[in-house]
């Protein structure tokens, strides 16, 4: 073996590899950094929340985007449910390799902000028509302290679904519009066989019932959270839970349910009314053997709704060219035509006024009047529980609601406890942040 | 030849053993021991998913776990689940394995029927059982009514949600254990039964006095695996109830998953995992020194 | 003979009702997969579909590239199994038949793998896989499972059932440890190997969380992720297509099982050693 040569080449190798390591260190946060050519590669992680077709629709949209934007190449990554998506994005963030854009549930906004992961796009949005054309309630889900961190893409709220056949049979011709009417209607529609209930008047989609609960609190005129605390023990919140307890005690609604199970219950005629996501509209409409009515959630002091679904967020930790490309992408996904298309094919509520003013959605509303209900209700809608550590806060709230409805404890005590625990958790996460 | 073996045996054995264990140990080191070491390290720190900053905490995480009522609730739920589900599933499995180790007609069909639940992906199986348990139109309540039993709210009730998941687990795990026991029965010489049968020993006594002792190594395996499996149940709970209602179905693995990936509290999740490892390790040691002593190996 | 015939019919009498109970969820899956969406929960339309709607199958396949997923699933589960058979045969033999220091301690170290809660090791393993440069590739779904404490334990128990005289005889014939393992032990415990193989394949075939975390591209993803598209939803499940996809995902496994369960009839040791 030629020793000298091999030593030299080894040293050479060491030098060049250390140079490579330095380069990797410099650009380590963006391994997708374009090499040589101008093409920018972006990743987009998204969940599938409504039906299997969403994967196909998103893929088609991305393909179209990539063919119409020759300098940007977006890779669409299906990441499971909202929870799975969040988990995947966070894990990538932890190793300094986040996707350029992703689609989480809107409650996660503060969580990602506390990780300093989001790019502030306020200036870009102001230079555009974003503030004029998006529905304000929907835009608010990406806002914190007057700054914008994303664009609303797929938005939903809870709505009241009702079984028109059962209503007709009972001689009721209109959906309830106030809490009192809700109680009356539910009573009239509950059917018993001895002590067994064969048909409930009303069911709330379990698992996300805390989301529905926040809508009730909003109907009492309160948003039960701020950026750094929750107010589940406010009179408005306690009153909302007391109303739920009354309905359970009156025997018109089950004390608990599951998200999947409640949708099945409705389709099987086991419950006359159902609070579920607007995202379920297409599924319930096409799978129920009867006419499905859709109405506003009844008001108390006011109408009120909580927004589910999410915005497209952009990573902070990326070069300017990439951020610009990410913005182009998010902007394109939420342009008038694409929001129209997305709304029609999935049932999510289009976030742009111009989409609703277009001919396509106008004729869609004629065809599916229920879609209009969701849009109108959106005027009363706001973001859902955007506090740091929202996952745990949700668990505390759900436990409090479940325990109360099961009769183990009283609304005031349960909600006070949940508030104390939640605020302690928020404080812990905030302390972590600084 | 034999002299050489005897002379070299102890040392030679050790070398062969090292060689034979090495492939496993390399991968265990990378994907089991390293994570466990990190988990021990994490448990003394404040580690957040998605952040590279780590702060030293000392024993604070351990104190938090012990004070968390939800930890104890999920611990109790898991223990209750394990204590009932595993014995029932193993007994079902044993009876099925013995019955299907014969040459009865359609044995392949029977075996497939009892084993297929293991194959159904949990997302799908979970959804099907949500339907089966539906109060009102679900077939299980229909059957309860037919048998004159009271109808239950099942997954909607904090008293019955966990038992509902346990019943489903018996459906799933009986076939799983059956397969393992069926394989074990193949290692047992059949002539032992012939002799017993000629002596007029009843089927029940054959089971107790011949079959069980003869397959005791595998029964022992199944008991330990059953316990380990059941304390890792996650899929069905995640699909069907997400731990509700009122945390009635929150189990330890779900609890760890929530803490690690939803609450981003890796330090806390690691702490729970470490404490469980200690507990389950102790439990297995107890089982090994009690049941383990009664295991009879044909090979010795 | 007559008595045993009687016994056999008696056995069917007990088994048939239980089997019917056991199989009913599968029947529901099959029936639902050929229904229209409206029929699924409509009590008045009865248990059976009005018409058999086969469209659900192509419609389920259309949500994701199921062909690619199927090939990947086969590659991943196949590779895991092949590697595991090697690692566990060697390790189980060492534990069952060799004497070496700290044997029990090392054996309990193997069991650690099944004792430690899986979600507590996800993060570290993600980082490891990433540092190995395996992220978003098929090996990422294989490497964490190559060693199997479970399989080692299972096989060790079976090896210890093999009469030592057989091993001694092989030894006298001049077989080394490896030859004894290969020619005596592995053939004798074939039923256990088959059982392990079935369990390993079924487990990894249905694995969802880990593949979801470590893969991004459709070209390296596996079947359960396609299934997840139909099940994980805000809107209630897409029942008819979910059940069709379930049938698609499960059929290869069922086929495999029906073929291999024959191994559980009259193996060498069972029938007698003479």
Image: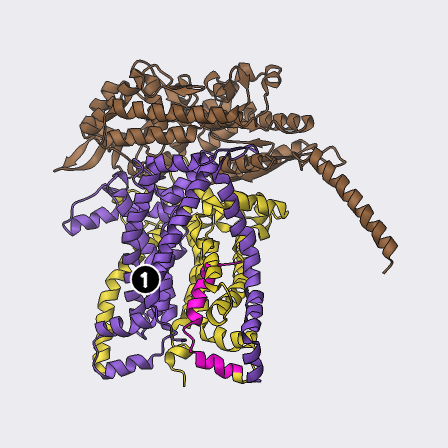
Chain colours: A brown, B purple, C yellow
**Residue name at image x 33 percent, y 19 percent:** A217
* Magenta residues, start to end: C147-171
Residue B143 or residue B249, whichever sits in front = B249
- Name the residue furthest front: B7
Which residue is under mark 1? B290
Which of the 4 quarters of the picture holds residue A128? top right
**Image x and y of residue B229, in percent:** 38, 53
- Name the residue furthest left: A194
Q: Is residue B288 left or right of residue A56?
A: left
Q: Secondary structure at mark 1?
A: helix
Q: Chain of mark 1?
A: B
Can residue C163 be seen here? The reply is yes
**Residue name at image x 37 percent, y 53 percent:** B282
Residue B190 or residue A186, whichever sits in front = B190
* Above/below status of A430 relative to C173: above
Q: Is residue A167 left or right of residue C272?
A: left
**Image x and y of residue B137, in percent:** 24, 43
Residue C114 or residue B61, whichever sits in front = B61
Q: Residues within 10 Å of mark 1 (few under 14, many from 20)?
A: few
Residue B177 or residue A151, whichever sits in front = B177
**Image x and y of residue A23, in percent:** 73, 36
Queried whether the magenta region covers residue B262, the answer comes back as: no
* Above/below status of A300 relative to B271: above
In this rendering, the count of numbered labels is 1
Task: Give the quarter of the figure containing the N terminus of chain C.
Answer: bottom left
Q: Main secondary structure of the magenta part?
A: helix
**Image x and y of residue A254, in percent:** 24, 33
* Above/below status of A79 relative to C258: above
Queried whether the magenta region covers residue C156, the answer comes back as: yes
**Residue name at image x 33 percent, y 17 percent:** A219
Task: Give the quarter of the figure containing the C terminus of chain C.
Answer: bottom left
Can residue B178 be seen here? The reply is no
């Amino acid at each position: 073996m030629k020793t000298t040569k091999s030593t030299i080449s080894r040293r050479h190798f060491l030098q060049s590899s250390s140079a490579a390591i330095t380069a990797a260190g410099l650009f380590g946060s963006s391994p997708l950094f374009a090499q040589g050519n101008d093409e920018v590669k972006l990743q987009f992680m998204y969940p599938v929340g409504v039906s299997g077709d969403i994967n196909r629709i998103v893929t088609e949209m991305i393909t179209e985007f990539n063919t119409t934007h020759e300098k940007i190449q977006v890779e669409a990554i299906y990441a499971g449910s909202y929870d799975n998506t969040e988990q995947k994005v966070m894990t990538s963030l932890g190793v300094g390799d986040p996707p350029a854009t992703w689609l989480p549930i809107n409650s996660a906004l503060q969580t990602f902000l506390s990780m300093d992961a989001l790019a502030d796009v306020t200036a870009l949005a102001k230079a555009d028509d974003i503030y004029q054309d998006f529905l304000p309630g929907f835009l608010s889900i990406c806002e914190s302290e007057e700054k914008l961190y994303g664009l609303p893409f797929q938005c939903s709220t809870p709505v009241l679904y009702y079984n028109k056949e059962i209503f007709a049979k009972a001689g009721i011709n209109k959906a309830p519009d106030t809490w009192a009417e809700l109680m009356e209607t539910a009573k009239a529609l509950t059917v018993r066989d001895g002590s067994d209930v064969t048909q409930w008047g009303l069911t709330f989609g379990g698992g996300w019932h805390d989301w529905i609960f926040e809508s009730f609190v909003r109907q009492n005129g309160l948003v039960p959270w701020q950026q750094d605390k929750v107010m589940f023990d406010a009179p408005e919140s306690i009153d909302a839970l007391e109303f739920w307890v009354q309905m359970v005690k009156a025997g018109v609604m089950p004390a608990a349910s599951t998200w999947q199970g409640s949708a099945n219950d409705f389709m099987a005629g086991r419950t006359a009314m159902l609070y579920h996501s607007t995202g379920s509209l297409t599924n319930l409409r096409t799978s129920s053997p009867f006419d499905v009515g859709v109405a506003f959630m009844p008001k108390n002091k006011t109408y009120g709704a909580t927004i589910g679904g999410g915005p497209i967020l952009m990573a902070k930790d990326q070069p300017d060219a990439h951020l610009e490309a990410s913005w182009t992408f998010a902007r394109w996904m939420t342009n008038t035509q694409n929001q129209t298309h997305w709304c029609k094919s999935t049932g999510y509520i289009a976030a742009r006024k111009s989409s609703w003013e277009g001919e396509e959605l106008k004729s869609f509303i004629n065809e599916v009047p229920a879609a209009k209900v969701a849009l109108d209700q959106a005027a009363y809608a706001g973001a859902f529980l955007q506090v740091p550590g929202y996952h745990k806060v949700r668990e505390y709230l759900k436990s409090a609601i479940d325990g109360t409805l099961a009769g183990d404890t009283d609304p005031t005590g349960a909600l006070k406890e949940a508030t104390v625990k939640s605020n302690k958790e928020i404080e812990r996460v905030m302390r972590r942040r600084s | 030849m034999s002299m050489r073996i005897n002379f070299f045996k102890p040392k030679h054995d050790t070398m062969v053993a090292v060689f034979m264990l090495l492939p496993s140990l390399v991968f265990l080191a990378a994907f089991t021991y390293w994570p466990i070491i990190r988990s021990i390290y994490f448990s003394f720190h404040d580690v957040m998913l998605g952040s590279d900053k780590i702060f030293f905490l000392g024993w604070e995480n351990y104190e938090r776990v012990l004070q968390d009522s939800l930890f104890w609730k999920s611990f109790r739920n898991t223990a209750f689940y394990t204590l009932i589900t595993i014995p029932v599933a193993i007994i079902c499995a044993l009876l099925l394995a013995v019955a299907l180790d014969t040459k009865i007609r359609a044995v392949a069909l029977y075996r497939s029927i009892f084993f297929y639940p293991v194959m159904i992906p949990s997302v799908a199986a979970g959804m099907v059982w949500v339907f089966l348990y539906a109060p009102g139109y679900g077939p299980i309540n229909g059957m309860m009514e037919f048998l004159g039993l009271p109808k239950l709210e099942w997954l909607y009730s904090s008293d019955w949600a966990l038992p509902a998941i346990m019943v489903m687990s018996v459906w799933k795990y009986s076939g799983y254990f059956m397969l393992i026991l069926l394989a074990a029965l193949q290692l047992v010489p059949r002539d032992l039964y012939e002799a017993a049968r000629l002596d007029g020993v009843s089927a029940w006594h054959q089971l107790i006095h011949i079959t069980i002792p003869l397959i005791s190594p595998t029964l022992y395996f199944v008991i330990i695996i059953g316990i380990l499996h059941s304390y890792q149940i996650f899929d069905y709970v995640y699909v069907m109830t997400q731990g509700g209602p009122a945390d009635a179905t929150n189990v330890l693995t779900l609890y760890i998953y929530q803490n690690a990936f939803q609450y981003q509290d890796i330090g806390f999740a690691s702490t729970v995992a470490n404490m469980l490892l200690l507990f389950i390790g102790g439990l297995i040691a107890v089982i090994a020194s009690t049941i383990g002593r009664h295991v009879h190996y044909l090979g010795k | 003979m007559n008595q045993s015939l009687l016994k056999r019919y008696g056995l069917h009498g007990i088994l048939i009702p239980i089997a019917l109970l056991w199989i009913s969820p599968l029947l529901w899956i099959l029936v639902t997969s050929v229904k229209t969406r409206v029929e699924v929960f409509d009590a008045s339309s009865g248990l059976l579909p009005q018409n058999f709607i086969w469209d659900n199958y192509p419609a389920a396949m259309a949500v994701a590239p199921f062909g690619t997923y199927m090939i990947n699933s086969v590659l991943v589960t196949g590779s895991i199994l092949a590697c595991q058979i090697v690692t566990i045969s060697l390790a189980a033999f060492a534990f069952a038949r060799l004497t070496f220091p700290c044997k029990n301690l090392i054996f309990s170290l193997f069991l650690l793998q099944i004792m430690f809660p899986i979600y507590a090791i996800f993060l570290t393993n993600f980082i490891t896989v990433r540092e190995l440069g395996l992220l978003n590739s098929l090996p990422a779904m294989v490497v964490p499972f190559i060693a199997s404490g479970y399989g080692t334990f299972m096989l060790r128990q079976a090896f210890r059932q093999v009469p030592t005289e057989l091993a001694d005889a092989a030894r006298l014939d001049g077989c080394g440890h490896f030859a004894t393992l290969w020619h005596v032990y592995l053939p004798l415990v074939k039923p256990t190997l088959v059982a392990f193989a079935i369990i390993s394949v079924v487990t990894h075939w249905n694995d969802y969380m880990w593949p979801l975390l470590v893969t991004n591209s459709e070209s390296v993803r596996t079947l359960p992720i396609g299934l997840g598209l139909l099940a994980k939803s805000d809107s209630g499940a897409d029942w008819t297509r979910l059940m069709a996809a379930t049938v698609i995902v499960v059929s290869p496994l069922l086929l495999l099982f029906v073929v291999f369960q024959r191994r559980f009839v009259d193996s060498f040791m069972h029938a007698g050693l003479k």
